[in-house]
Image: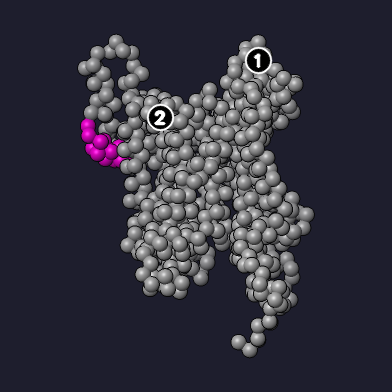
Amino acid sequence: MLSYTLRRLAFAVPTVLIISLIVFLMLDMAPGDPTGSLPLTIPLEVREQIRISLGLGEPVMIRYFKWLYMMCVTEPLHIVQGMTGWNIAPEGPRILSWQTRSPVGDIIVQRVPQTLWVVGMGYLFGILIALPIGVISAYRQYSWFDQVGTFVSMIGFSVPTFFTGVVFILIFAVWLGWFPSMYDTTHVVRDWNSFVFQAKQIAMPVAVLALYNASQISRFMRASMLDNLNQDYVRTARAKGLGEKTVVLVHVLRNSMIPVVTVIAIGIPTVFTGAIITEQIFRVNGLGDALIRAIYVSDWPMVQTITFIFAILIVLFNLIADVLYGILDPRIRYD
Amino acid sequence: MTDAAKPLSPDEAFRPPRNQWWDVWDQFKTHRGALAGLAVFVLIIAFVVLGPLIWQVDPGQINIRERNQGSSWTYPLGTDQLGRDLLARLMYGGRVSVAVGLVAMLLGLVIGTLIGVLAGYFKLLDSPLMRVTDLFLALPLLPLLLILVTLFRDVLAKTFGESIGVFLLICFAIAITSWMQTARIVRGDVLALKEREYVLAARSIGTPSSRINTRHILPNVLSPIMVSATLGIASAIITESALSFLGLGFPPDFPTWGRILYDGRDWIEQYPARVVWPGVMISLTVLSVNYIGDGLRDALDPRIRGR
């Protein structure tokens, strides 16, 4: 198992590097130039100096390796220094955002908590809703509960989040007026009232994400339970006189969770990227919002860095899923 | 071999052989959701293809005096902030959305099938092609799509013209980010099929590899390809609408369902219909296609069929 993990890790690093190189080269081909939006009265020499000051004077590969060094060493150390106060950050340049001229790492640190709260809670609630629905649907296959459950999950799976979000705003913010339609990120939770406000404003984005994730996970849960319910070991467990509750909730559920857990693990990074849309609907200024804004104004260092983070997340969680699968299912042997 | 085959009655013996697609259709018919999905999908196609022939209103016709109208006989679904007829816009927008879905799905399918067959059939290509597939699976797709569209929109618009250029770009971008699942499924099936006796027999009489693939292997991997095709349409339509919704899809004078939804979002408090209609169209299309896919998967699975 350990050697497998190490082997996979050795493979994951080049994957991430190649992805970052692809994105870097693509952005390098971009027609947009950071000096393009400056006034035309600036003479060419000054324009060239501005380009060099932004780190654009050197060949592509040198810039790529410089960026990679800053991304992997300078920025993380600066972030750790910001959080702990240890004096460990190296001197030297940092990745600067072209739109704000501040280090990309600082902006990302500001943006991550909002994304984590909204997306994380959306995913968590999604799982909590999906698991019981999947279990009951499979146990009572073709019952009305199953029919309704599969239909609702088909709808939740088909209706894009940007439409569910808009419909939620329409119903709960415009007509009923229960929740605010926009997310106020400057809001600080101090007392009970501000906590209630926070709960209200986070309710809709979380509900949209939870519905979408729940419909996907419950389909997996149901299919996985159905696979296991007809296995011989279930009959054996019943034959030796175990209660129905023990059979389903201990024997079947535990075996059915193996593929579902890996699906949940693989889904975490896609939730981050998919939440870009939810963040746009509810104006949550999270990581996805930072990415969209950076794309609008051609702020390539920002785009590059956020895409790189997403790529790391995807590769990492794929790895976690594979390793988890091996740990949970002793029948799987990797070596 | 002790059971003697029951002698066929003359009627049965001389019955013309039945095409397997009839069996598939028979199984497909038993799936109520799939039938309903098919009916809805046909209706939507009729709405976007035949609709503009009946409802001959120019979707780009600006009429400021008639702006923000509610439903009436002249404007069944009302007009937008520039007085353009929403029904006509939905029809034309649907054409673009469905066309993007179909073209992107076909492109993705071709790429995926090609890579899957090459990887499955030729041992030498297997490992490198599958590494490429894994690499693509690890890409953050939505951000990458957004980057692709922003970077190449102007270039392609210059060479092919505004609308065609963006159309090609979006189809290509969706295809290049969605072929991986098809490739994996096809590769797995091809790997199993190429060891079968009938492929060996074909090879033994000197059939070239290209013919073995097109004549003997591809028809047998058609079922998974068809299922991933239907799912591909659904995800392509959603992706296109998502791009338009983020303002990075088609230009504003070129309606698609996602774009109409995006434009209507600013008016949601006064005129919710402008958001609801395009959203309902997208959702209905995707829902119907997903149900068709579900039914097709059951119908094409020989283990389920005939039971």
Q: Does A306 sit left or right of B16 as displayed?
A: left
Could you say which is closer to the camera, residue A122 or residue A92?
Answer: A122
Residue A327 seen in the figure: yes
Query: A13 and B138: which one is in front?
Result: B138
Say which amino acid is labelled 2: Phe
Same-subunit check for callouts 2 and 1: yes
Please, which chain is the residue tagged with disc 1 on?
A: B
Task: Tell me the CA gap for discs 2 and 1.
Answer: 33 Å
The region drawn magenta spans A58-71
Instruction: Nearest to the eye among marks 2 and 1: give it.
Output: 2
The residue identified by callout 2 is B160
Q: Position of residue A206 (x, y in %)?
A: 62, 39
Quadrant containing the C terminus of chain B is bottom right
- Residue A316 versus residue B264: which sits nearer the camera? B264
User: Residue at the right extreme?
Assistant: A144
Residue A163, image x, y percentages = 63, 35
Q: Which residue is identified by label 1? A: B67
Q: Position of residue A153 (x, y in %)?
A: 67, 48
- Which residue is nearer to you in this view: B87 or A72? B87
Q: Residues within 10 Å of mark 1 (few under 14, many from 20)?
A: some
Q: Is residue A211 among the parts visible in the rendering?
A: no
Q: Give the mark count.
A: 2
**SS for callout 2:** helix
User: In percent of the image, x 67 and y 47: which residue is there?
Assistant: B37
Q: Main secondary structure of the magenta part?
A: helix
Question: Is residue A62 one of those drawn in magenta?
Answer: yes
Mark 2 closeness class: few <14, some 14–19, many ≥20 residues within 10 Å: few
Q: Is residue B174 magenta?
A: no
Q: x, y (%) of residue A26?
A: 34, 37
Q: Could you tell whether B268 is left or right of A313 in the image?
A: right
Tell me the quarter of the picture where residue A38 sits. Answer: top left
